[in-house]
Structures are given as structure tokens and as C-alpha cells.
Image (spheres, grey):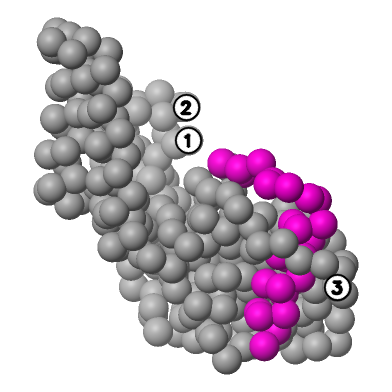
Amino acid sequence: MSEVKAVAAGIVNFLKQQLDGDTLSPESRESIEVAAQCIETAYELTPEQLSKGMDLLQLMRQQTSNPVADLAEAEKLKNEGNELMKTENFREAMEKYSKAIEIDPRNSVYFCNRAAAHFKLGEHEGAVADCMAALALQPNYGKAHGRLGLALTALDRHVEARIAFARAVQLEPDNESYKDNLRIAEEKIAQRGGRPSMDLGGLLQNPALLNMATEMLSDPNMQNMLSGLMNANTGAPAAGGMGTNVNALLEAGQALAQQMQAVNPELVEQLRRQIRPPQGTGGGNPPPTSQ
């Protein structure tokens, strides 16, 4: 149904709603009945289309509602959730956080707090999802990185957990809990022996890596390099044949590595450690469940 028909259906529905009341005079009721019938006929509205018409009254209420009062209500729900967490009523706390998110879905704190409730309930995938939502809204949110690390640790995804804890330490270098969790994650990886396999799924979900990729791809120099590389590999073979394309790929890889090092040397070091983790000994204690 087109937008015009949706509006027309909304008007017809509104007029019919007014006829259900007893505040109209007989003359007014007759005029409204004629108006509703004329609009319905003019726009050839079917019963199904009328059922999908816009709710004009609800739309008006949303536009005239007090956003400040709404945000205050969301904050109140968050605080109630925090109190419920203290008394270990985790399910009820999660419901409070969910209601706060419905009111203000742009608040990263609400997602991060709900992640903590998910974690306490053993719903670790839900905790990961909420942490990722919080980081999408606020990439430099240390607590969200820390809680993401805890949830990933509970899922035995220690390589990804180490990246999350390392970022949390970078953002909050005085937080000893993050440092301990990072050390434990590294020990868990070292216990596996040798070089752990690269977890591409974890890398692609790393907000810091995504931010760096976006920044690099917006660089005109990088765009020109990639464009030239694509043209070289899709065109006719040069005199050097396959060797020329291989050399071009090597040069592009070196340029990409240099650009990554310049943009975010800390993240590059994290990636290097993921590929070649430091060797450690001992199993350590399990990471704390809350922060």
C-alpha cells in the first residue's frame, strides 16, 4: 500500500473512531459519515488497506510527547535494574533494562547493563550481542569491552576474549581486573600449545578493527592504491606475466601493513599476538564474573 493510501486510510479510520463517541451532534455525525465514505471511495480503499492505515492519534501523541520525560523514565528504569542486580534478581533487572532500551535505544549503558544481566543468567550469547550493540554505539566504552571479554571467556572463545580485554586495558589502564583477565586469557591460549588458529569471525566482529578499516578505506591514497591494483589484475597480462601481478599484490600488502601500523599500532600488536601468542605457564584462576 502506498504512503498516500496509508494516510487516506488513517483519516477514514480516525473519522470512524469519532463516530463511535457520543459528543457529536446529529448534523456533525452525518457530515463525518459522508466525508469518510467519500475518502474511502475516492481512494478505492479495501477493508484490508483500512486495517493497515496510519493511527493518526498515536502518531500525534508520539510527536507531542515530552522527550525529556521519556529519557528520565528510561534512566529511572535503568536505576531500578541496577538495584535488582544488587539483590540478584537478574531476570527482573534484565526486563527493566529492556524497557529502558525501548525508550532510548541509543544509550550504550543500557545495553552494557543488560549484558551483565544476561551473563549472570548464563545467557552468554545474549551478553555478547548486547556488548556488541553497546560498542556499536560507543566504540571506546571500556566496560563494554571488559564484559564482552567475560562473555567470550565463558563461551571458551579465548582468542576473541583476549582482544576484548586488551582493548579494555588500553582504554582503562588502571583497571587491575581487566589486566588480570587479559593475563588469564593469554594463559588459556598458551595452554593449547603452538600457534592457535586465526579466528576470522572474532576479528570481523572486533569494533576496533572495523573502525580502523573504515578509516583506512576513506584515505584517498589507499583508494588509489586499491584501484590501481584492481586495474592491474583485471587487465591484460603485462610483460612479466603472473610475476607482475604477484609483485603488485606483495607491494599492496606491504603498503596496507604500513598503513595499519600508522593508524592503530596498538591494534596491530594485538593482531600479532593473536597469531603468535606469548607462551605462558599455569592455568590461572577463572575470570571474575562481574565488574
Q: Which mark is residue 286?
A: none
Q: Residue at x 13, y 10 (%)?
A: 239
Q: Earlier in the sequence, mark 3 or mark 2?
A: 2
Query: Where residue 116 sits in the image (x, y, percent)?
Result: 71, 72
For residue 245, side relative to residue 81 (left or right): left
Query: Where residue 202 sits in the image (x, y, percent)?
Result: 59, 48
Q: Is the residue under label 2 in contact with that under label 1 (CB below 8 Å)?
A: yes
Answer yes or no: is residue 19 visible. Answer: no
Q: Find the distance from the CA under tag 1 to the CA under tag 3.
A: 62 Å
Seen from the viewer's position, the closer of residues 173 and 59 is 173
Which quarter shows the C terminus?
bottom right
Q: In which quadrant of the rendered view does residue 155 lie?
A: bottom right
Seen from the viewer's position, the closer of residues 241 and 187 is 241
Seen from the viewer's position, the closer of residues 93 and 265 is 265
Q: Amino acid at mark 2?
A: Glu
Q: Residue at x 41, y 53 (%)?
A: 210
- Range drawn in magenta: 176-200
Q: Amino acid at mark 3?
A: Gly
- Residue 194 belongs to magenta span: yes
Q: Amino acid at mark 1?
A: Ser
Nearer to us: label 1 or label 3 = 3
Q: Find the distance from the CA under tag 3 to the CA under tag 2.
A: 64 Å
Q: Earlier in the sequence, mark 1 or mark 3?
A: 1
Q: Which mark is residue 48?
A: 2
Q: Find the distance from the CA under tag 1 to the CA under tag 2.
A: 5 Å
Q: Which mark is residue 51?
A: 1
Label 1: how many residues lie within 10 Å, few (<14), some (14-19) or many (20+)? some
Query: Where residue 117 sits in the image (x, y, percent)?
Result: 75, 71
Q: Which mark is residue 284?
A: 3
